[in-house]
């Protein structure tokens, strides 16, 4: 079934590669997933090339506050973690992938400790664990209070630096996958802003390409994601013909610091862990509106909290709600939440004495490049892990702090394939389909269309309107093939895929809330929407049944 008349870019629009280099494994992205694959590949004795669009530390991982979930406590178990993950996933989790996640989780965290991550510990020296939305008990390891991601990145970058055989190229944007005559990945083209011989457009060749490019947050006006989150891996995979799934399940974090209606770009997160430690939501009249919304009240799964906030905002005509954490006290704020304390104070709000204005903003994409439980996409030799992938562990809604864990666990799985050998190496064939890039000027229109039409609240009419606006974006001049035009083109490919799937899914489930289909979890929609870009630039949509019984 071809679902949209929109024509997306399908192939290389860049000049001929001016230089070439080769490796055994190419990793695109330098967050937790990409760096873990690189470390494993090096340990397998392989030549690894990591390419990253900005600085090696600039990805989403470094911004993660809450932490990383795993069954680490004595009173916890993988079965209990599995239960909470499946409940949050609202009937669409891939149970085999969830089993991998929860069973391998504790070992993956032990790897992080071995690579030097210093998690916060209690007086007995055990990992200090906190709680977040949807978790039945304390299960979240954290570092530096609320600076978990920054500490993980610090340790992993140091581990990579200890391996001079891992080559990292910063300021390198992956453009298009290179395929051989049998349709197998053999490397990619990239645009490097550098000095010397490897500047401009080049080709990196390897029989194994791992995409770990993170999120798509810049598709929307406001997001917790950093500026680099432009969906490059998903768009690259789409253009190469890889299947993409669950893209309609965009997670909006309920408590993002509200900086005014016009605030755009990356917004400061106020971690769920703040509610995990006892803060609660109130409206302008001080009413604790979460109390009657869910048995877990303020710690309900985040789609429930985000929707309750949106409903309350609409009902009270307020631009935001409030988070009350004053009773946590100055010491708790300073020691557990130094990042949030500093960012709030920098905006004139002191959480020790003030209510914090909060509203939902885009935070995470549960979907991505469809993979099996070994990180394999539908293109031989092309792997994906972390946020740009869809292993199926998140289903319709990711459980808090399962994302760093997913990146790590499935990077480990990819790593465990390496000792048995690489795919065959062959020469790539030159790409044939050439389409023009979008103008960088199109980005604000694209973001506004998606925010208006495919945000927390959606309907057939709003989605159609957004898709119409996306079809009408201006193209770039041929001479203007820089990073921003590629990013905008990538954003459009991702946005159309999200909008198309959101329009097709005629129900409300997980983080996908259709105002015109308010009833939740229609049994007929217990299936995954899988999109593939055809050579003519249209999207083909298929359905993948979700067979295995879930916990509801
Ligand atoms: C948070 O700290 O609230 C975010 C955690 C997550 O997205 O998993």
Image (tube, rainbow, N blue to C red):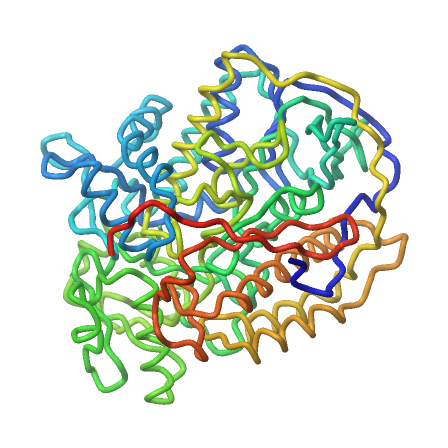
Please provide percent x and percent y for residue 402.
34, 45
Residue at left offset 69%, top offset 41% = 173
User: Can you tell which quarter of the image residue 290 is in?
Assistant: bottom left
Left or right of 344 in this view: 42: right
Left or right of 25 in this view: 391: left
Please provide percent x and percent y for residue 104.
31, 29
- Rendered view: 441 above or below 158: below
Q: Quadrant of the N terminus?
A: bottom right
User: Can you tell which quarter of the image residue 193 is in?
Assistant: top right
Pick the residue in front: 353 or 371.
371
- Rendered view: 217 above or below 141: below
User: Can you tell which quarter of the image residue 26 is in?
Assistant: top right
How many numbered circles does the render carry? 0
Residue at left offset 20%, top offset 64% = 279
Q: Quadrant of the C terminus?
A: bottom left
Residue at left offset 48%, top offset 44% = 390
Please provide percent x and percent y for residue 245.
53, 50
Residue at left offset 49%, top offset 51% = 367
Please provide percent x and percent y for residue 70.
26, 38
């Amino acid at each position: 079934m071809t679902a949209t008349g929109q024509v997306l870019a399908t192939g290389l629009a860049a000049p001929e590669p001016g230089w070439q280099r080769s490796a055994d494994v190419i990793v695109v992205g330098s967050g937790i997933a990409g760096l873990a694959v690189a470390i494993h590949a090096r340990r397998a004795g392989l030549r690894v090339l990591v390419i990253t669009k900005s600085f090696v530390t600039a990805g989403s991982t470094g911004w993660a506050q809450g932490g990383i979930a795993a069954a680490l406590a004595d009173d916890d178990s993988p079965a209990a973690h599995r239960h909470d993950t499946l409940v949050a996933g609202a009937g669409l989790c891939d149970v085999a992938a969830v089993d991998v996640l929860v069973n391998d989780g504790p070992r993956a965290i032990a790897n992080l400790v071995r690579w030097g991550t210093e998690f916060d510990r209690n007086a007995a020296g055990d990992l200090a664990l906190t709680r977040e939305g949807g978790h039945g008990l304390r299960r979240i390891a954290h570092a530096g209070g609320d600076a978990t991601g920054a500490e993980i990145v610090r340790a992993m970058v140091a581990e990579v630096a200890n391996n001079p055989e891992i080559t990292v190229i910063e300021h390198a944007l992956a453009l298009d996958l290179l395929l051989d005559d049998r349709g197998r990945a053999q490397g990619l083209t990239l645009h490097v802003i550098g000095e010397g011989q490897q500047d401009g457009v080049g080709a990196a060749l390897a029989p194994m390409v791992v995409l770990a490019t993170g999120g798509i947050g810049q598709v929307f006006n406001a997001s917790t994601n950093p500026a680099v989150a432009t969906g490059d891996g998903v768009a690259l995979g789409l253009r190469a013909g890889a299947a993409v799934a669950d893209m309609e399940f965009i997670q909006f974090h309920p408590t993002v610091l509200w900086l005014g209606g016009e605030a755009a770009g990356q917004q400061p997160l106020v971690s769920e862990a703040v509610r995990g430690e006892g803060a609660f939501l109130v409206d302008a009249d001080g009413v604790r509106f979460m109390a009657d919304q869910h048995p877990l009240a303020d710690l309900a799964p985040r789609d429930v909290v985000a929707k309750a906030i949106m409903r309350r905002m609409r009902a009270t005509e307020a631009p935001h709600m409030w988070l009350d954490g004053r009773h946590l006290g100055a010491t708790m704020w300073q020691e557990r939440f130094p990042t949030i304390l500093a960012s709030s104070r920098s905006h004139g709000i002191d959480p020790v004495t003030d209510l914090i204005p909060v509203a939902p903003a885009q935070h995470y994409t549960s979907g991505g490049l469809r993979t099996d439980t070994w990180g394999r996409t539908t293109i031989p030799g092309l792997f994906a892990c972390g946020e740009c992938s869809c292993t199926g562990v998140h289903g319709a809604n990711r459980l808090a702090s399962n994302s760093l864990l997913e990146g790590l666990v499935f990077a480990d799985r990819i790593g465990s394939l390496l000792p048995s050998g690489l795919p065959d190496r062959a020469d790539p064939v030159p790409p044939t389909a050439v389409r023009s890039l979008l103008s960088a000027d199109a980005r604000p229109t694209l973001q506004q269309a998606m925010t208006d039409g495919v945000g927390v609240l959606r309907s057939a009419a709003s989605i159609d309107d957004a898709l119409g606006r996306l079809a009408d974006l201006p193209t770039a001049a041929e001479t203007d093939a820089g990073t921003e035009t590629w990013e905008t083109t990538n954003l459009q490919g991702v946005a159309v895929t999200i909008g198309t799937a959101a329009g097709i899914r005629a129900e409300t489930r997980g983080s996908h809330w259709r105002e015109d289909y308010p009833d939740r979890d229609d049994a007929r929609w217990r299936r995954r929407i899988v999109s593939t870009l055809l050579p003519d630039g249209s999207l083909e949509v298929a359905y993948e049944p979700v067979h295995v019984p879930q916990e509801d």
